Image (spheres, coloured by chain):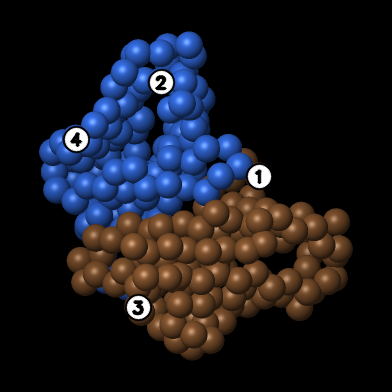
Amino acid sequence: QKEVEQNSGPLSVPEGAIASLNCTYSDRVSQSFFWYRQYSGKSPELIMSIYSNGDKEDGRFTAQLNKASQYVSLLIRDSQPSDSATYLCAVNPTGGYSTLTFGKGTMLLVSP
Amino acid sequence: SQTIHQWPATLVQPVGSPLSLECTVEGTSNPNLYWYRQAAGRGLQLLFYSVGIGQISSEVPQNLSASRPQDRQFILSSKKLLLSDSGFYLCAWSRYDRQGASGYTFGSGTRLTVV
């Protein structure tokens, strides 16, 4: 059973702080990892992808991957109220024809 | 650039009525296509996926079916809706990548309420 676990939250941070969102996965051979942002009532939007151990930065977002610990995280620097959303972690177990497994998401609330 | 269209945006249907949701992708060929459902307060549930015309894989046994009559068209159907079919239905596409490195792009979704 391939599982992706996330704390449901809500994670509350003040504006300007760093928000740290975490995700663990069960399938050790997982290849690709993705973070999606979903605003209430809207569809998920891909914001970050990471395939190798280490950090990947894109603007205020940094994805971190540790395959040995089966752990992937998303850091949001200088959090803004517009970052308030549910963040979904997704894992592609083996590549090719396999489908993404999604976590249930962590709700982030950024207060002004 | 690639775009994905999904309609209708909202739908209210009585129990026992049929359902047809359509999704089309533009700007790419031979995409992988997916139907997901997101029930209130729950995660994304994969319903069907397709890697080519006429090729459908079902993940969850239920009263829903899917078809892919054209390369970039994916249809979700039901002959008789149940109350439990209510939810947010999302179509998505991805490129086929041997390393599986391609993320999904979602359509705008259909919010279905069965009454």
> What's the amino acid at mark 4?
Glu
Distance from label 3 to label 2 (Cα)? 38 Å
Q: Earlier in the sequence, mark 3 or mark 1?
A: 3
Residue B61 seen in this snapshot: no
> What's the amino acid at mark 1?
Ala
Indicate the chain on which mark 3 is placed: B
Residue contact at pointers 4 and 2, CB within 8 angstroms:
no
Q: Which residue is mark 1?
A: B40
Q: Which residue is mark 2?
A: A80
Residue B7 at x, y = what percent?
63, 63
Residue at 72% across, 61% down: B85
In the figure, the shade used to draw chain A is: blue
Image: A25 above or below A57: below
Residue A54 at x, y = what percent?
13, 38
Q: Which chain does the brown colour mark?
A: B
> What's the amino acid at mark 3?
Ser
Label 1 environment density (alpha carbons within 10 Å; few <14, some 14–19, many ≥20): few
